[in-house]
Amino acid sequence: EQPVDDFDSVNADLWSKTQFTVLRQNNTKTVLAIDISTSMGIGKRWVNVKKAASQYLEAVPHDAHVGIVLFHRVAYVKVPLKQIENADSSDFLKNRLEKVELGVGTSIASALKVSMTVLQTSGPKDSRDSGGNIILLSDGQESHDPRIDDELIQELIDNKVTVNTIAFGTDASQKLEEVSSRTKGSSYFSDPENPNSILQDAFIAELQKDGS
């Protein structure tokens, strides 16, 4: 495994010029599911993703609930659903993305299963059966079981979970687009070496849609 350090100063300056516009909505439940396989350590990939996620967290309405799931060959909960009450709440979540340990392999299905469990078992008790959103980012193909199949996609649909996917580079699994399409989500492609508005827009896509 390989540790990933803080933002590169040049990329931080580039990203600091980005402005986010989020249309307000109520009681959003979103899990950020982020690939931390070793390939995310190539170049500035993790730096760029972490910066985009941080700006997303700064833009989330203060009545929303956000959780974080990280995955490589297995997935685990970094933060269960937490209400964004103020800047301190956002900072807490942003800080949980620091000093992440990258791991070998990729299981996107594992990330989806764990994210769905987070939506069902944390956050407001009166809305745990009301579905929610997953924003999943990956730069690779599935290499470990479990893998995405029709049964998993149907389970997401049955549980009212919308999956927005970000294919981070040309090596990302083509299954990402299928999952987002079948769960009524959005799919995006972003160049991992060149941070741009596509990556940023993808992170806040469901906030814009649901708030319109």
Image (cartoon, rainbow, N blue to C red):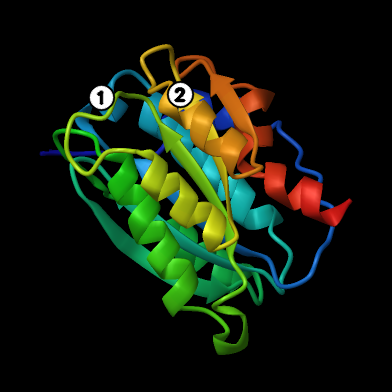
Q: Is residue 127 visible?
A: yes
Residue 44, quarter of picture: top left
Residue 192, quarter of picture: top left
Q: What residue is at 76 percent from the left and 42 percent from the top?
A: 20
Residue at the disc numbered 2: 168
**Residue reaching furthest bottom?**
125
> For this view, does 51 lie left or right of residue 106?
right
Residue at the disc numbered 1: 39
Q: Residues within 10 Å of mark 2 (few under 14, many from 20)?
A: many
Residue 184 lies, with reference to residue 10, above or below; the image says below
Location of the N terminus by quadrant is top left
Residue 136, position as x, y percentages in the image: 47, 42
**Residue reaching furthest right?**
212
Q: What residue is at 60 percent from the left and 55 percent from the top?
A: 57
Q: Residues within 10 Å of mark 1 (few under 14, many from 20)?
A: some
Q: Amino acid at mark 2?
A: Phe
Residue 7, quarter of picture: top left
Q: What residue is at 43 percent from the left and 21 percent from the top?
A: 174
Residue 122, position as x, y percentages in the image: 46, 78
Residue 56, position as x, y percentages in the image: 62, 48
Q: Secondary structure at mark 1?
A: helix
Residue 57 lies, with reference to residue 108, above or below; the image says below
Number of numbered labels in the structure image: 2
Q: Amino acid at mark 1?
A: Ser
In whole angstroms, how far apart are the C-alphas of marks 2 and 1? 11 Å
Q: Secondary structure at mark 2?
A: strand
> For this view, does 17 lie left or right of residue 131?
right
**Residue reaching furthest left?**
1
> For this view, does 168 lie left or right of residue 85?
left
Q: In the rendered structure, are the residues bearing label 2 and label 1 in contact, judged by CB atoms less than 8 Å apart?
A: no
Residue 35 or 176: which is nearer the viewer?
Answer: 176
Residue 29, position as x, y percentages in the image: 61, 66
